[in-house]
Every structure is written in C-alpha cells, then in structure tokens.
C-alpha cells in the first residue's frame, strides 16, 4: 500500500464535494476513497494539496488501498466461492438500496449473499425480489436480506422519487415514458393523473411541462404518503393537488385537458370515469397490456365500446410485459375535434 494525503470530507456533503474535486482532476483515482466515522477520506494528488487545504478541509496522511478494478460480479463471486449455489450476477440500484433475485437453491444462503453484495456495491440495504408485484395496489414482494433501512431516493431526469422498496414498486422500465411526460407541452392545462403512485408521471409533468394544475389521485396509502413527500421535495406544491382515494370518486365533468391512465390489465374499467372528466378535444394517455399482434384492434374495441368519438393519435410500446405481450400507451384525442374518427 502507498501513502497518500486524504481530504477529510463530512459525509453529509461528500457527494457533491467529491464530484467537484473529481471534475477538477484533484482526486487520485488509483486509490480508494475511505470512511472514518462520519467522514469520507478522499485521496488528493500531491500537486493539489494546498488548493484543497485552502478550501477549508482538514488533511490527513495515511495508507491507501489500491482500487480493485475487477467487475463487481467477479468480486462477489470470489467472496461467495464456498457456497454451493448460483450467485446473482444482476441487480437493480434504487438509490443506495440494491434489489436482487435469488433462485430456490440460493435462498438458504441469502444472508451471506446480501452481506457480500452490500459490501462490494456499497449498499446500505439489500432486498430480494421474491414474486414481483401483486394485488390491486401492485405491492412488491420483497424480503430484506441485509440491512434495515429500505427507504431510498431515486434521482431520474431531474426528479427526486422517494419511496420504500418493500412497500412501493418502481417500474424502471417506464423511464422513457416518464421522460416523455417531462417533454410534453401542457402550458395552462388541467391534468388528472388517475393512478399517480408516488408521482411517476405527475412529477415530471408538473415540474417541466407548464401544466397549470395536476390532480394526482392515488388509492394506496403507502404510495400516497410518498406522493405527498415527493410533491414537496420537488417543489411543485403550487401545481399538484394530491387526492387519496378511488379515482372514480373524483367529482366534476369536462374539466380536464389531459388525463393520465398509467395502469395495466384492468385500465378499461376506469375509462368511463376518464371520459366523464375529459373536455372535448382533450387527450387521454391510455396504458394497458395487449398481445403484440392485436394491440391496435384491442384499443379500438375498448374505445368503441365506450361509445365515444376519438382519434388514435399515436401508440407506443413502453416495455415487454410477458411472452408475446407488451405494455403500450395510446394517446387518444377525444371528440368532437374529429367526430366518429376510427383511425
């Protein structure tokens, strides 16, 4: 091990400070950043010591471990090489919480696996996804296999999504659609998000699209709690009105310029409520799952059965859902802008 000089950075400000030092080429990238109680120890190149000291940070000499540049999958496998089971090679980061999948043979060793994954990846907690999402509220089925704190914050496209990975699902595969909501021009519009969750679509739309008002409805109390917090943390309290309850109970007719229906499989059950709230000429973003060879016919059938005038403006595949089944979103313009259109 070689001796280096570390800058002592308080952990509560370490993230942006370390990134700034790295951007300016001051950090020795061949040595590990260490920890000491509530501080991070950042190895500084000799030619920048005085400059960093001048920023007001304490300096300390010590021995630095060389960075292990092996892939994390390899390091985890080496640590668990004595186990007679398959070791996870893929995972999902949710802030500083990591989610893995374990097969049946790995389950008896989940505590060892969780500890190794946390150590190599620097996670505060590790959870095993046991059966995906279930029920009306689409709750995740998770077991904590390392750590205790399962609340985290995911930063995405300029939005902070805070949630508990054991109580609220986060569909990372919907990122492109969340980004599209950010890029919409909704200047002056009144929007209803019928299935707001923790604010998946509400937050980017409210923060960036120019919408005048967004009614964000959520029935799951756990999701609603994080929705309210995320509205505050993203600074959109003056735009978003959160509503706890069933979206079919929202009062009013013909007041919404745009409606988000970000649900799947039983979305059609909620279409009458959406059609009651939408103004003539308004847009419905209708999400659902269909077989890939019949999605257009199914969308037409659903809106034909609703007895409304509509135009299918566009249809996008959001992600694969199951073999031969995909999650789609259809942008539907409701008449009378183009009455009796069946495109």
Image (cartoon, rainbow, N blue to C red):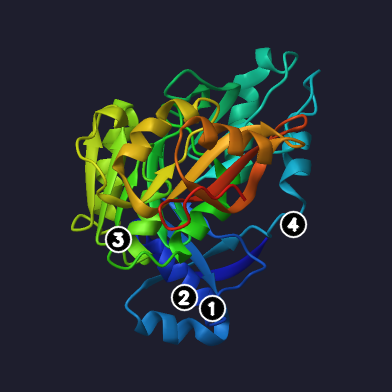
Residue 174 drawn above or below residue 10: above
Q: CA distance from mark 1 to mark 3?
A: 40 Å
Q: Which residue is mark 4?
A: 69
Q: CA distance from mark 3 to mark 2?
A: 39 Å
Residue at 62% across / 51% down in the picture?
Answer: 343
Q: CA distance from mark 1 to mark 4?
A: 20 Å
Of labels 3 and 2, earlier in sequence is 2
Question: Which of the labelled discs sits on residue 20, or is there none?
Answer: 2
Rate crowding at label 1 as few (under 14), some (14 to 19) or many (20 or more) other CA atoms within 10 Å: few
Of labels 4 and 3, earlier in sequence is 4
Residue at 41% across / 45% down in the picture?
Answer: 260
Of labels 1 and 3, earlier in sequence is 1
Can residue 37 be spotted in the picture?
A: no
Query: Which residue extends farthest front?
Result: 340
Q: CA distance from mark 2 to mark 1?
A: 5 Å
Q: Quadrant of residue 163?
A: top left
Q: Nearer the viewer, mark 4 or mark 2?
A: 2
Q: Nearer the viewer, mark 3 or mark 2?
A: 3
Residue 328 drawn above or below residue 179: above
Residue 213 drawn above or below residue 129: below
Q: Which residue is mark 3?
A: 189
Question: Which of the labelled discs sits on residue 23, or is there none?
Answer: 1
Of labels 1 and 4, earlier in sequence is 1
């Amino acid at each position: 091990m070689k001796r280096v000089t570390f800058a002592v950075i308080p952990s509560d400000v370490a993230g942006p400070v370390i990134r700034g030092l790295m951007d300016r080429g001051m950090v020795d990238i061949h040595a590990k950043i260490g920890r000491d109680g509530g501080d991070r120890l950042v190895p500084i190149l000799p030619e920048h010591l005085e400059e960093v000291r001048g920023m007001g940070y304490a300096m300390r000499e010590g021995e630095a471990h060389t960075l292990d540049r092996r892939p994390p999958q390899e390091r985890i496998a080496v640590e668990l090489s004595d186990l007679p089971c398959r070791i996870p090679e893929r995972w999902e980061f949710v802030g500083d919480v990591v989610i893995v999948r374990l097969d049946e043979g790995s389950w008896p060793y989940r505590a060892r696996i969780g500890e190794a994954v946390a150590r190599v990846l620097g996670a505060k907690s590790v959870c095993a996804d046991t059966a995906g999402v279930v029920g009306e509220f689409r709750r995740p089925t998770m077991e904590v296999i390392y750590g205790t704190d399962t609340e985290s914050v995911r930063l995405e496209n300029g939005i902070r999504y805070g949630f508990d990975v054991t109580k609220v699902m986060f569909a990372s595969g919907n990122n492109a659609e969340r980004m599209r909501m950010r890029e919409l021009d909704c200047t002056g519009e009144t929007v209803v998000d019928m299935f707001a969750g923790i604010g998946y679509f509400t937050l980017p739309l409210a923060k960036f699209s120019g919408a005048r008002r967004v009614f964000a409805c959520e029935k799951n109390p756990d999701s609603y709690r994080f929705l309210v917090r995320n509205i505050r943390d993203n600074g959109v309290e003056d735009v978003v009105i959160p509503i706890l309850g069933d979206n079919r109970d929202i009062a009013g007719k013909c007041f919404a310029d745009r409606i988000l229906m970000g649900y799947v499989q039983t979305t059609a059950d909620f279409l009458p409520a959406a059609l009651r709230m939408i103004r003539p000429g308004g847009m419905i973003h209708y999400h659902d799952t269909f077989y890939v060879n019949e999605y257009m016919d199914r969308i037409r059938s659903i809106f034909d059965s609703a007895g409304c005038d509509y135009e299918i403006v566009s249809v996008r595949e959001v992600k694969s859902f199951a073999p031969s089944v995909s999650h789609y979103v259809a942008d539907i313009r409701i008449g009378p802008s183009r009455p009796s259109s069946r495109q």
